[in-house]
Amino acid sequence: MKKPGRKAAEARKAPAGRRGRQPFRELKYCSRCCMPETQEGITFDEMGICQACQSSEQKIHIDWVKREKALRKILSEAKAKAGDNYDCIVPISGGKDSTFQLHVLVKVYGMRPLAVTFSHNWYSRTGWRNLQNALEKFSVDHVMFTPNRDLVNRLARKSLEAIGDACWTCHAGVGAFPLRVAVCYRIPLLVWGESIAESSGRASYRKPVHTFDRDYFTKVSAKLSADQMVSDGITRRDLLPFQLPSYEEIEQAGVRGIHLGDYIFWDDERQTEFVRDTYGWKETEIEGTYKGYKSAECIMPGMHDFTCYLKRGYGRGTFHACMDVRCGLLTREEGFDLASRYDSERPDALDYYLEITGMTEDEFYRVMEKHRLPELKGVGIPVKKRKRKIREKILPYPLQVTGDEAGS
Ligand SMILES: [Zn+2]
């Protein structure tokens, strides 16, 4: 586990006078961690403690041995039914959870999964390497879908206007493609990684989201269906990769999704160390946070988290600080300092975003202003310049491989 001392030292770099204080005095924050009331789906108990904090306490009291037995049963039933087919689908991106999911399924339970990847077409160099490394280390068959770059660029623009972040392509594709493969290959079981109860704040271990249904990703992340994204310059036909199978198709194939984190004790930091030391998974530098493992496969997480900050007043720095506060690595005050320091950094990824969409920076901020939550209307949201460029190149991976970086 990372040394708390280092993080605490970094936290102390917050501007004097602001140290230890919540980033926006206009917002209500969880009384235990650093999450503001503007997080989607957040609820507080009578003590003002958020659901993710409640979840982290419930985790300690869960009978994980019993849960693991339930997992074993689900997997062995899937295996028994599979015959000559794959035992399950494992949707992977190349992130740390992907390697961990494959470890659990292949090495611990002896499953024969089909790995399925929806590519956002924004792979980072480190992420591409991690994905290929996992496929090699576990010898799994793999299906990948990549929408064309022109469409990805057009959708990036439409996405910001429609849902206030640039990532609809990924949200919708990650939801749709594994389901399409499940129906097409007749593999009913999908095994996802982290539990929704872990830190999303949308559920807790005692109040789980029982049904992982067809529309789950549309509801929680994509917000809009493929049909709702049809607009000038984006046709229904363009959006075929994002169409979900019908309810009948899902029912006929008996598709069911589970999250490993509902059955085995989830510990992001420990699992990151485990996949790094055991399988050579690599962290990288990620904009907007002090941890190097979340969305390491993508060149655009800085953009995603910066838009969240402009809309809701918190970004990935807050999110990660909350995780560290919950497990006792940071005090709440140190968490606030890290949040203030990282969330407000203008990401380098914004330059790439403006380039691929043809938007000006003023236009970008105007669009984001429209998505700002009512709690933050009229509130000054500080934005700081980054001091230096990040290590990861913010360029489409094919351009990095060919060296044709100027696009000539
Ligand atoms: Zn909390």
Image (tube, grey):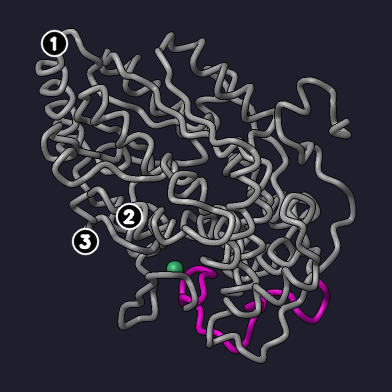
Residue at 49% over, 11% down? 137
Which stretch did the figure color magenta?
A: 15-36
Q: Residues within 10 Å of mark 1 (few under 14, many from 20)?
A: few
The stretch drawn in magenta includes residue 26: yes
The residue at which mark 3 appears reads as 207
Alpha-carbon span between mark 3 and mark 1: 35 Å
Residue at 32% over, 41% down? 261
Circle nearer the viewer, 3 or 1: 1
Residue at 42% over, 56% down? 199
Mark before the other along the chain sequence, 3 or 2:
2
The residue at which mark 2 appears reads as 197
SS at badge 1: loop
Amino acid type shown at disc 3: Lys
Percent x, y of residue 243: 36, 45
Q: Does residue 271 appear in the picture of this structure?
A: no
Q: Nearer the viewer, residue 407 or 46?
A: 407
Percent x, y of residue 201: 38, 63
Q: What is the total number of numbered labels drawn onto the structure image?
A: 3
Q: Is residue 188 left or right of residue 162?
A: left
Contact, CB < 8 Å: mark 3 with mark 2?
yes
Task: State whether label 1 is within 8 Å of ligand 1.
Answer: no
The residue at which mark 1 appears reads as 83
